[in-house]
């Protein structure tokens, strides 16, 4: 039996059947760790909870571009409001450390780095005055650089990185599901309270089948 990630393809087919696929003729193929399903009308991606964790882990590798492009800005505000509690001084220290990590993953560009550090220092100066508009100010100054730095800082607060990525999945699938796939269809398979070890997500995508 073909596999998608660590699970058998039949597991993804059965998950789609819960979505209503028993009444449709559809075709399935592995898609990385996930599965694609074509019912002749739409293309769906079926992902297990652990598949999304694995995807999100790859977004946090140099040069961190996907950390910026694949997550909504508001996700980081949600983390700061609901999960992360840091004093201003500790937050600034961790931001500096994350800034260094970020630039280790970038191609050497002295002019861009100087501009970025100037924006970073402006962000820190503002943070000492107002801790409530960190995300907004970062977006105004240089979102492509500063948002990944903030994301790295949030990740740093978790002793176990996988717990951070699991929270990313929870927030994305509960509050920002319109940012998954093409935003047209999103379904969590299973009744309320379904355990994460058995949870699949089905969503429409713009992929070739």
Image: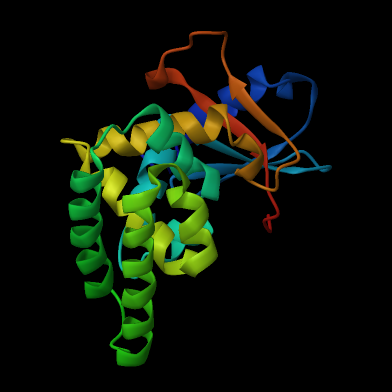
Left or right, residue 45 beside residue 25:
left
Which one is in front, 173 or 35? 173
Left or right, residue 17 beside residue 107:
right
Which one is in front, 27 or 140? 140
**Residue 99's spot in the image, x, y percent?**
26, 65
Q: Quick one: quadrant of the N terminus?
A: top left
Left or right, residue 98 beside residue 71:
left
The residue shown at (57%, 22%) is: 14
Q: Is residue 7 visible?
A: no
Which one is in front, 103 or 170? 103
For residue 19, above or below residue 85:
above
Q: Is residue 74 visible?
A: yes
The residue shown at (27%, 50%) is: 153
Q: Quick one: quadrant of the C terminus?
A: bottom right
For residue 124, above or below residue 74:
below
**Residue 143's spot in the image, x, y percent?**
49, 64
Determine which quarter of the picture holds residue 5.
Answer: top left
Determine which quarter of the picture holds residue 38.
Answer: top right
The residue shown at (38%, 62%) is: 123
**Residue 193's spot in the image, x, y percent?**
49, 8
Q: How many marks?
A: 0
Determine which quarter of the picture holds residue 164.
Answer: top left
Which one is in front, 84 or 16? 84
For residue 67, above or below residue 201:
below
**Residue 176's spot in the image, x, y percent?**
59, 36
């Amino acid at each position: 039996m073909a596999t998608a990630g660590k699970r058998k393809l039949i597991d993804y087919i059965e998950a789609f059947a819960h979505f209503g696929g028993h009444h449709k003729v559809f075709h399935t193929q592995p898609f990385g760790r996930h599965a694609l399903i074509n019912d002749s009308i739409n293309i769906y991606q079926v992902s297990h909870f652990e598949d999304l964790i694995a995807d999100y882990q790859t977004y946090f590798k140099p040069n961190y571009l996907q950390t910026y492009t694949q997550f909504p800005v508001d996700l980081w505000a949600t983390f700061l409001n609901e999960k992360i509690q840091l004093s201003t001084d500790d937050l600034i220290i961790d931001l500096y450390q994350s800034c260094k990590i970020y630039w280790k993953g970038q191609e050497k560009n002295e002019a861009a780095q100087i501009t970025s550090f100037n924006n970073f220092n402006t962000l820190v100066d503002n943070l000492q005055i107002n801790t409530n508009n960190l995300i907004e100010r970062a977006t105004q100054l240089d979102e492509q650089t500063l948002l990944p730095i903030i994301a790295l800082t949030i990740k740093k607060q978790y002793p176990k990185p996988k717990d951070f990525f699991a929270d990313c999945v929870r927030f994305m699938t509960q509050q920002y599901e319109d940012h998954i796939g093409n935003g047209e269809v999103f379904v969590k398979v299973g009744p309320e309270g379904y355990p994460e070890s058995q949870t699949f997500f089905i969503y429409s995508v713009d992929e070739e089948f």
